[in-house]
Image (cartoon, grey):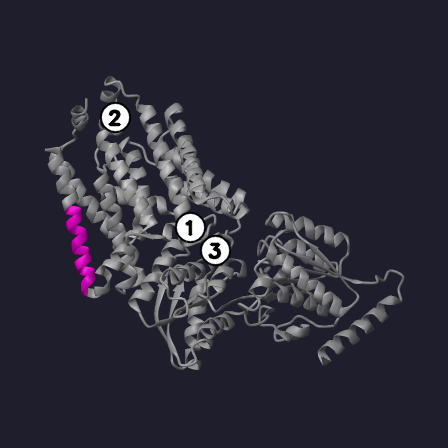
Amino acid sequence: MLRRLLLLRETILIGAILLLLALIATRFPGFIAPRNLAGVFNDTAPLIILALGQMVVILTRCIDLSVAANLALCGMVAAMLNVAMPGLPIPVIIALVIALGAVLGAINGLLVWKLAIPPIVVTLGTMTIFRGIIFLISDGKWVNAHEMGAAFTGFPRAEVLGLSVLSWIALLAVAVFAIMMSRTPLGRSIFAVGGNPHAAVYTGINVGRVQFLAFVLSGALAGLTGYLWVARYAVAYVDIAGGFELEVVAACVIGGISIAGGVGSVGGAVLGAVFLGVVKNALPVINVSPFWQLAISGSAILIAVAFNARAGRTKGRIILKSAEATP
Amino acid sequence: MSVLKKVIASAAVATALLSGPALAQDNTRIALVVKALGIGFFEAAAKGAEEAAAELGGVEIIYTGPTDTTAEGQIEVINALIAQQVDAIAISANDTDALVPTLKKAMDRGITVISWDSGVAPEGRQLHLNPSSNALIGNMIIKLAADHLPDGGEVAVLSATTTATNQNIWIEEMTKVMGDYPGIDVVSTVYGDDLADKSYREAQGLMQAHPELDAIIAPTSVGIVAAAQAVVDAGKVGEVNVTGLGLPSEMAGAIESGASQSFAIWNPIDLGYSATVLAYQLAKGGAVAEPGAEIPMGRMGSLTLDDNNEGAMADPFVYDASNIDAFKSIF
């Protein structure tokens, strides 16, 4: 029953995306050319990666508003590392930013777990702190394209089998998270903690620890995206990805992840991100007045959420249902 | 040259007149007060001020400012300068109003006060030197694109936010002079909100929606960098020229890759030079700052003051492959 409902929600989203593409194609046929769609997916890849992390956090009844600031800080560190040590191999830089992102996420997680501060307050605070740290380490200066190495900016752009490395990383992240959420004890306990924390405790799950791990995951993905972002746009400064955290949350909400926790899926988060990505990429080419663009983006979010709310009302809250399936 | 001779002559007269009394100082001391020390832009302005001092002769430049960009810090600095009895203060202010009382005190003590770059309210200074004017900038951004399109072509504007005052005024001024550039068509104006990712996407969209596009004009430092990157990634270097307003340090890569042929921004060296000459003219050269006055500023021509005693120095300075290396380390 639950599986069918989930399937339904995702089918609605896929239908909405296809309808959107068809509408765009009537005004700008070139948009649905395979080459362009690959470009749209590539542009949406950072949002997809971050939405996966945010999904995990939201499922545990928390929220991570510091993802964009975490991304910006890790991106700045990656850029400064590249400038200071041009010989440092890209895989080392990636490993370092993932570790740094995870540490920053762990700070959020510890504050939520050990001090029991509401996640929205914790991450609102760390969001500002992270941005402040970027200013401190960079002195407010930009790291520019000509200072970065060719390998540094070239890595996410390199094409493998017709898709950029950036797109492949997003696909890899989706695969890893799909397996983790459905096939590992951690994935199942994330659903359990969000579905009913009290019941989760009785099944032997440490709620705080799961929330902590969710923040670490979200942070690590933000760190990874930080490097990808800075390399893709070939610039790092204090305000990169400003306000992006809200887009990430919007992608999750559109994807049917309940803000109250416990309900959602990897497919939903990805489709939510793709939906937003299509809208963002289409608006500039279909010649819509910029004054309408924000209103259109906002309406799309509201309509999608209204859909989800209706779907949610019919079935009621399902507690620990899917967790029971795993031994 | 005659202006320069006049300057030197009047300087000589002034020195002769002042050399009589026992209190006379050997040098005219002009303080260049900046928003904060250690900023490349202002270091470059100080370089221009030294150039002016060498040209004028008998001028000592005191380059100073607080360590952080606060009005309080600047007030302390100005008080110290008043105590030292400098002849003139040329300031780039951290606050329009907060500095007025202190600067008034300085003027009461006979010190010439002018503001440059970032202005002070009219009652706190004798004149204000703007690096450029909206009309000059509006003309420059379209000229930059048109100069590389002798046979005309399609250009698009990538701005900051829809509500950004500066950008909107510049685009308006640009529209006014479009008649001077026949064959140049502005096909679209889009907004990147001064976000790297949105600007990049908008630039991509422009290239898709207008396959014949020849130039993107971005009068914003975030937008111009993002558009240049989008052009490189789309493989359209040489087809689409990205231009507008940007900083040399941020645009060096775009010039190197060829995505941008040229761009403009004020030249801080010229700005420091002009501020120094103006301060000198007011303090020693007998010039009076009043609406309509025309005050010579050496190699930069002369400054015409409007009703608020403000004037614009010059067209924004154009940076291209020939001079980018000299400026990219400055600001």
How packed mark 3 is, by other alpha carbons closer than 10 Å (few <14, some 14-19, many 20 or more), is many
The magenta stretch spans which residues? A12-26
Residue A16 painted magenta: yes
The residue that disc 2 covers is: A185
The residue that disc 1 covers is: A231
Residue drawn at 50 percent across, 47 percent down: A82
Q: Quadrant of the N terminus of chain A?
A: top left
Q: Amino acid at mark 2?
A: Pro
**Callout 1 and callout 3 share a chain:** yes
Q: Is residue B118 left or right of residue B256?
A: right
- Separation of marks 1 and 3 at Cα, in angstroms: 9 Å
The residue that disc 3 covers is: A145
Residue B164 painted magenta: no
Q: What element does badge 2 sit on?
A: helix
Residue drawn at 51 percent across, 46 percent down: A87
Instruction: Name the quadrant containing residue B172.
Output: bottom left
Q: How far across and how far down the image is residue B219, in percent?
A: 45, 65
Q: What element does badge 3 sit on?
A: helix
How packed mark 2 is, by other alpha carbons closer than 10 Å (few <14, some 14-19, many 20 or more), is some
Instruction: Name the quadrant containing residue B12.
Output: bottom right
Q: How far across and how far down the image is residue B265, in percent?
A: 53, 65
**Callout 3 and callout 2 share a chain:** yes
- Separation of marks 3 and 2 at Cα, in angstroms: 43 Å
Chain bearing mark 3: A
Residue B287 appears anywhere in the view:
yes
Q: Is residue B158 left or right of residue B65?
A: left
